[in-house]
C-alpha cells in the first residue's frame, strides 16, 4: 500500500528562494572528526551477516535508542542560531530532473529509514536516519549520538548499518554497512549539543542469497599465552566481528623440544618409536637422555594387561621391560614440547549479493545550511515510546511525519545554546536522527535536509511532548558534510 501525507493548502515551493546553490560558507572547512566504523570488506560482510543471520533476529529484537531523548528546552526570542555566511544548498539527487505533475498528496520519502547498532549495553538499538546526496551516492545523515556512544567514552557504535524503508524485518533496498563516520570536532571532543549531527559513508547495499549459520573459526598460532590474550581482546573489541564462542586453546608444538620445567611447555607421553628418534639405539637405559626427554619407570604388583616382557604395548607407549621378583616393571617415554596458542570459535556465514549504491536505489536529499529561522519544515522519523504521562502514541514501526515552522531554542542540559525547534508530538525514542526537510517535493519525495532530531521536549509542562530539537545547520555543518561527501566506499560482495 502506498503511504501518503496530505499537504492541503501547504505551499511546498519557494522555501529556498534566497538560497545560493554555489555559495561557499566562510567556515566550510570547519573542524571535522573522522572515525572508521569498519576497515575491510570482510569486516563489513560480518556486520551484514550479524543483522541478516538467524532470520534477522537482531533487527527484529532491536529497541529504539533512548539516550538523551527528553530534555528541558525553551523558545528564545533573542540570540540563538544565526547564519555564518550566505545561505546555500547542495542539490538533491533529483534537482536536475523534470518534475512530474503537482499533487496535494506527497509520498513519504524512500530516503528515510533506520540505523541499527549495538549500544553501550551490548544490545541492538535503532535510530532514524536519511540518505543524503553525495558524489558517490553513499551518504547517510543522523544524530551524532546515534553514531558516537556518549555513554562509553565516545566510542563509535558497534555493527552500524542503515536500512532504508525498514519495516518489521523487511529490508526492501538492502542493508548498507557504515564505513566512516564524520562529525564536528566540538561534538566529538566536548559533546556539544549544537553540533550533534553525523554524516556516515556506507558501502553498497547487500541482500542475502543464502544463510549457512556459522562456520568454525581458527586463528594462527601464537608463541605465548599473552600474545593470544591480546589478540583475543582485539577480536572481541573489533567492530566488524560476527564471531562467537571465542576462546584460547593450547597447541603442542612438536617441532620444538624444550627443557623440562620450561614455562609454557608440556610433558607428553609418546610412542617409544618417536622417543627413540631423539634417543637412538645405544643410549644407556638410565640415561643421560637428550634434554627435554625422559623415561618414567613403574613397578606393579599386578601383571599389566597384555604383558609380554621385552616388547611394547599395542599402542607403542609402554615398554614391558622386565620382572623383578614379584614386581612387574614397565617404562613409559616422554618428550617435553613447547606450547603455542590459538583462538577458536564460530564465525557467521552468509551469502550476500550486491544491490548497488544507496543513492541509486532510494535517492538522496539535498542539504540546506545558513537558512533563516522561521521557515516551515517536514520532519520524517520513526517515533516510539511514550509521552511523560504514559500515553503511547507511536509504535516506531512505520514512518511518520510532522510539519511546522522552526524557531530558536536552547537546551542547556545537552550543552546546546543555538538550536532550532519545531512544534511536534514525536516522542524521543526512535525519532532521534529524524530528517528535517525544507521544500519537500511531492513528486520526487525529495527536499533539502536542514536538521536532524537530537532530542524532544515538553515545553508547556503538560507531560506531553510538543517540541523536536535540532542543531542549526550552518557553514560548519556544510564543512563536515563536504568532508564526508567526497569519500568513496565501494562494494562488499
Image (spheres, rainbow, N blue to C red):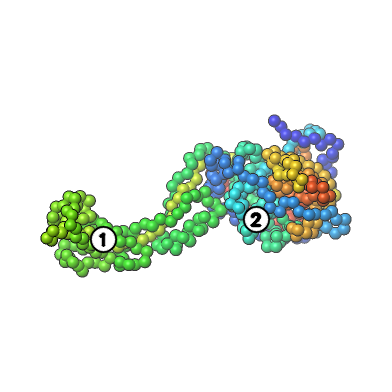
Q: Where is residue 247 in the image (x, y as percent from the top left)?
A: 45, 54
Between 417 and 109, the one lying in front of the other is: 417
Position of residue 359 relative to residue 273, above or below, is above
**Which residue has dot 1 on it?**
334
Residue under the image location 78 percent in, 42 percent down: 402
Position of residue 477 relative to residue 259, above or below, is above
Q: Where is residue 280 in the image (x, y as percent from the top left)?
A: 19, 62
Element type where label 2 sits in the image: strand
**Which residue has dot 2 on it?**
148
Residue under the image location 67 percent in, 43 percent down: 113
Residue under the image location 65 percent in, 51 percent down: 200
Give the quarter of the image for residue 261. bottom left
- Looking at marks 2 and 1 on the same chain, the residue that comes earlier in the sequence is marked by 2
- Rounded to the nearest whole Å, what is the CA distance between mark 2 and mark 1? 56 Å
Judge left or right: residue 140 versus residue 325.
right
Q: Which residue extends farthest left?
A: 325
Q: Which residue extends farthest bottom?
A: 288
Q: Which residue extends farthest top?
A: 1
Q: Where is residue 42 in the image (x, y as percent from the top left)?
A: 51, 49
Element type where label 1 sits in the image: strand
Residue under the image location 55 percent in, 45 percent down: 50
Pointer 2 local density, CA inside 10 Å: few below 14, some 14–19, many at least 20: many
Judge left or right: residue 398 versus residue 286.
right
Amino acid at each position: 500500500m502506498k503511504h501518503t501525507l496530505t499537504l492541503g493548502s501547504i505551499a511546498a515551493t519557494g522555501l529556498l528562494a534566497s538560497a545560493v546553490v554555489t555559495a561557499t560558507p566562510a567556515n566550510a572547512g570547519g573542524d571535522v572528526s573522522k572515525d572508521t566504523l569498519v576497515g575491510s570488506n570482510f569486516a563489513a560482510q560480518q556486520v551484514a551477516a550479524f543483522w541478516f543471520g538467524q532470520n534477522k533476529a537482531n533487527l527484529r529484537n532491536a529497541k529504539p535508542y533512548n539516550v538523551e531523548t527528553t530534555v528541558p528546552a525553551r523558545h528564545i526570542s533573542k540570540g540563538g542560531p544565526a547564519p555564518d555566511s550566505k545561505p546555500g544548498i547542495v542539490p538533491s539527487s533529483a534537482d536536475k530532473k523534470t518534475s512530474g505533475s503537482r499533487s496535494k498528496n506527497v509520498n513519504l520519502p524512500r530516503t528515510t529509514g533506520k540505523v541499527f547498532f549495538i549500544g553501550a549495553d551490548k544490545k541492538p538499538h535503532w535510530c532514524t536516519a536519511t540518505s543524503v546526496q553525495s558524489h558517490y551516492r553513499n551518504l547517510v545523515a543522523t544524530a551524532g549520538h546515534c553514531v558516537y556512544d556518549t555513554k562509553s567514552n565516545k566510542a563509535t557504535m558497534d555493527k552500524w548499518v542503515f536500512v532504508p524503508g525498514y519495516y518489521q524485518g523487511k529490508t526492501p533496498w538492502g542493508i548498507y554497512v557504515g564505513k566512516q563516520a564524520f562529525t564536528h570536532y566540538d561534538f566529538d571532543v566536548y559533546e556539544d549539543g549544537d553540533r550533534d549531527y553525523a554524516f556516515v559513508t556506507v558501502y553498497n547495499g547487500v541482500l542475502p542469497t543464502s544463510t549457512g549459520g556459522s562456520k568454525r573459526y581458527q586463528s594462527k598460532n601464537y608463541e605465548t599465552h599473552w600474545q593470544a590474550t591480546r589478540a583475543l581482546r582485539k577480536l572481541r573489541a573489533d567492530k566488524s566481528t560476527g564471531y562467537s564462542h571465542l576462546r584460547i586453546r593450547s597447541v603442542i608444538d612438536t617441532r620444538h623440544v624444550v627443557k623440562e620445567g620450561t614455562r609454557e611447555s608440556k610433558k607428553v607421553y609418546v610412542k617409544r618409536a618417536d622417543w627413540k628418534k631423539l634417543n637412538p639405539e645405544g643410549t644407556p637405559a638410565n640415561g643421560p637422555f637428550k634434554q627435554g626427554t625422559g623415561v618414567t619407570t613403574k613397578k606393579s604388583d599386578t601383571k599389566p594387561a597384555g604383558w609380554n616382557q621385552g616388547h611394547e604395548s599395542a599402542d607403542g607407549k609402554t615398554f614391558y621391560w622386565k620382572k623383578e621378583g614379584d614386581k612387574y616393571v614397565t617404562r613409559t617415554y616422554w618428550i617435553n614440547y613447547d606450547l603455542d596458542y590459538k583462538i577458536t570459535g564460530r564465525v557467521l556465514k552468509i551469502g550476500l549479493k550486491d544491490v548497488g549504491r544507496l543513492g541509486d536505489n532510494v535517492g538522496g536529499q539535498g542539504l540546506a545550511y545558513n537558512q533563516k529561522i522561521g521557515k516551515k519544515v517536514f520532519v520524517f522519523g520513526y517515533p516510539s515510546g511514550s509521552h511523560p504521562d504514559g500515553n503511547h502514541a507511536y509504535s516506531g514501526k512505520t514512518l511518520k511525519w510532522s510539519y511546522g515552522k522552526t524557531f530558536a531554542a536552547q537546551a542547556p542540559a545537552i550543552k546546546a545554546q543555538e538550536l532550532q525547534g519545531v512544534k511536534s508530538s514525536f516522542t524521543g525514542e526512535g525519532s532521534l536522527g529524524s530528517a528535517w526537510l525544507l521544500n519537500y517535493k511531492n513528486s520526487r519525495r525529495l527536499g533539502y535536509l536542514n536538521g536532524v532530531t537530537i532530542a524532544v521536549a515538553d515545553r508547556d509542562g503538560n507531560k506531553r511532548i510538543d517540541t523536536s530539537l535540532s542543531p542549526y545547520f550552518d557553514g560548519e555543518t556544510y564543512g563536515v558534510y563536504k568532508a564526508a561527501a567526497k569519500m568513496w566506499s565501494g562494494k562488499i560482495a
